Image (tube, coloured by chain):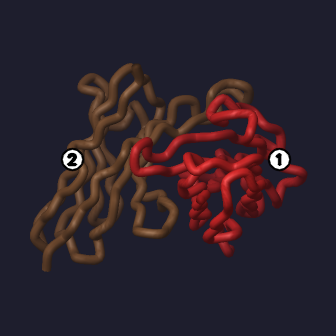
Amino acid sequence: SQKIEQNSEALNIQEGKTATLTCNYTNYSPAYLQWYRQDPGRGPVFLLLIRENEKEKRKERLKVTFDTTLKQSLFHITASQPADSATYLCALDIFPGRSLTGANNLFFGTGTRLTVIP
Amino acid sequence: DAGVIQSPRHEVTEMGQEVTLRCKPISGHDYLFWYRQTMMRGLELLIYFNNNVPIDDSGMPEDRFSAKMPNASFSTLKIQPSEPRDSAVYFCASRNLETNYGYTFGSGTRLTVV
């Protein structure tokens, strides 16, 4: 069956360190992989997207890698801050608009709750 | 832009009652998605629309669930009759593939069926 796993339910890290979150998947061939941030009581917020032919993408303190051979994405937050504390979700975008009548779905992992300790 | 707007934010209803959740997508977004989030199952896609037309409703759990999108600025998700196992947070999201592949989510409706 199809499966998306995020490395752990919770991750605690000291302020200033780099947080690394892992997303592993099986039985998918995603064209895109997306990362979202979700705060309590709020909807997920889009952070970054990486394409299947890209190895790495950066945005400010965020970095995402995508290894389609290992079927894995790593999400890094450098110089972490208490304000980065949230749940981070990875999502596989299987058919992003390739066909209007085909599946167009974002499959989400269950998330990793990151806590940055001051 | 006010983002994706959902109402109500919270809904408490008795088992057997009809529940209607509402969503206003971002103007210009041609895809609209309804998701359900629970602790056990995470985020699950229920149904999505493209240009107001339902494309894939395979995630709708039962016939008790129905969704409509009468125009580009409004969609509803209806549960009739509601059951306690429907308790969850329901999110609406929209997207425009021409400008951004990222989904924009609303703040959700927390539904409690007692």
The residue carrying mark 2 is: A8
Label ID, residue A23: none
Q: Residue at x 60, y 56 (%)?
A: B91
Q: Secondary structure at mark 2?
A: loop
The chain that appears red in the image is B
> Callout 2, which amino acid?
Ser
Q: Give the Cα separation between the discs numbered 1 and 2.
A: 37 Å
Q: Residue at x 82, y 47 (%)?
A: B68
Q: Name the residue at the right extreme.
A: B70
Say which of B59 and B55 sits in front: B59
* Residue B30 in view here: no
Query: Where is residue B10 drawn, in percent x and y?
Result: 61, 70
Query: Where is residue B92 drawn, in percent x and y?
Result: 64, 55
Q: Is residue A54 placed above or below B81 in the rendered structure?
A: above
Q: Secondary structure at mark 1?
A: strand
Query: Where is residue B24 drawn, in percent x and y?
Result: 75, 63
> Callout 1, which amino acid?
Lys
The residue carrying mark 1 is: B68
Have a look at marks 1 and 2 and say if they share a chain: no
Say which of A30 and B62 sits in front: B62
Q: Name the residue at the bottom extreme.
A: A118
Number of numbered callouts drawn = 2
Quarter containing the N terminus of chain A: top left
The chain that appears brown in the image is A
Residue B80 as seen in the image, left or right of residue A62: right
